[in-house]
Amino acid sequence: MRDETPSERPKFKTCRRYNDAGHAHALTFCCFRRQKFLASPRSCQWLVDAIDLARRKHEFDLWAYVMMPEHVHLIVCPRRDEYDVSRFLSTLKLSVTRKALAFMQLEAPESLSLMLDEQPNGQRHYRFWQRGGGFDRNLWSDKAIFAEIDYVHANPIRRGLCERPEDWAWSSAADYDLTRLGPLSIDFASLPRSYETERGSRRSPPR
């Protein structure tokens, strides 16, 4: 991957996606009404399983992630030139929503109202995720990719949830720091070739 020229501006969007060959994607999406649905290990594990399912089904590599109490950041890269980020997200979100709804119906029916989205036209839906596609930024330069990885890993620090990025359990920061292996494997092998130069010499994390 190469650095952008000044005329090439990053693409930020909330509705339209650009499934451009060779581009990685920085994805951000929130829980319904920004409620802290991801504050429990149970729901985070649902998300771990869903990310694994989506990346295998749609052939995406996972380069970084952090699960915050009410939102998620992912950096993913398609393995094929033809791909659809929306389908990747749909698989991921639907899997988590189904598990959450089944759990609430069985174990905490009195709390189902937290997921209820009742529209003025009378339609009722139960949601784990906020409506809409979230945010999706195309990444096509090494510099932008590494900066985004640092931004993702620093989220818990900015919120005062921990002192070091690698201390946050639901993040890939510890994998990069070689402190431990996180709940999701990171596809280090597909990172840009300049990874070692940009980040400094280091051995590959064990898998």
Image (tube, rainbow, N blue to C red):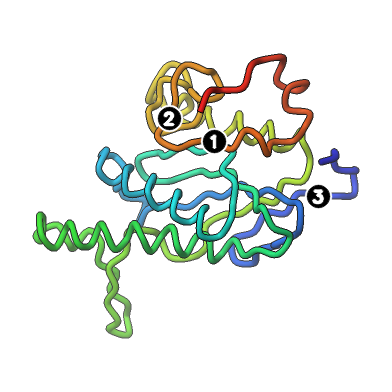
Note whether 99 is above or below 182 in the view shown.
Answer: below
Residue at (29, 48) in percent of width and height: 37
Q: Please indicate whether residue 157 sits to the left or right of residue 194 in the image.
A: left
Q: Quadrant of residue 143?
A: top right
Residue 120 % position (x, y): 32, 80
Callout 3: 10 Å neighbours few (<14), some, many (20+)? few
N-terminal label among 1 and 3 = 3
What residue type is disc 3 on? Arg
Residue at (43, 16) in percent of width and height: 163
Q: Please indicate whether residue 26 sits to the left or right of residue 131 in the image.
A: right
Q: Which residue is mark 1?
A: 186
Q: Please indicate whether residue 88 sits to the left or right of residue 141 in the image.
A: left
Residue at (37, 45) in percent of width and height: 70
* Residue occupying the far bottom of the picture: 121
Callout 2: 10 Å neighbours few (<14), some, many (20+)? some
Find numbered disc 2 in the image and state the secondary structure of the residue it sits on: loop
Q: What is the CA distance from the residue labelled 1 to the residue labelled 3?
A: 27 Å
Q: What is the CA distance from the residue labelled 2 to the residue labelled 3?
A: 33 Å
Residue 80 % position (x, y): 69, 58
Find numbered disc 3 in the image and state the secondary structure of the residue it sits on: loop
Q: Which residue is mark 3?
A: 9
What is the number of callouts on the image? Answer: 3
Q: What is the CA distance from the residue labelled 2 to the residue labelled 1?
A: 9 Å
- Circles 2 and 1: CB atoms closer than 8 Å: yes
- Circles 1 and 3: CB atoms closer than 8 Å: no
Q: Nearer the viewer, residue 141 or 82?
A: 82
Residue at (73, 22) in percent of width and height: 196
Q: Nearer the viewer, residue 117 or 88?
A: 88
Q: Which residue is mark 2?
A: 182
What residue type is disc 2 on? Gly
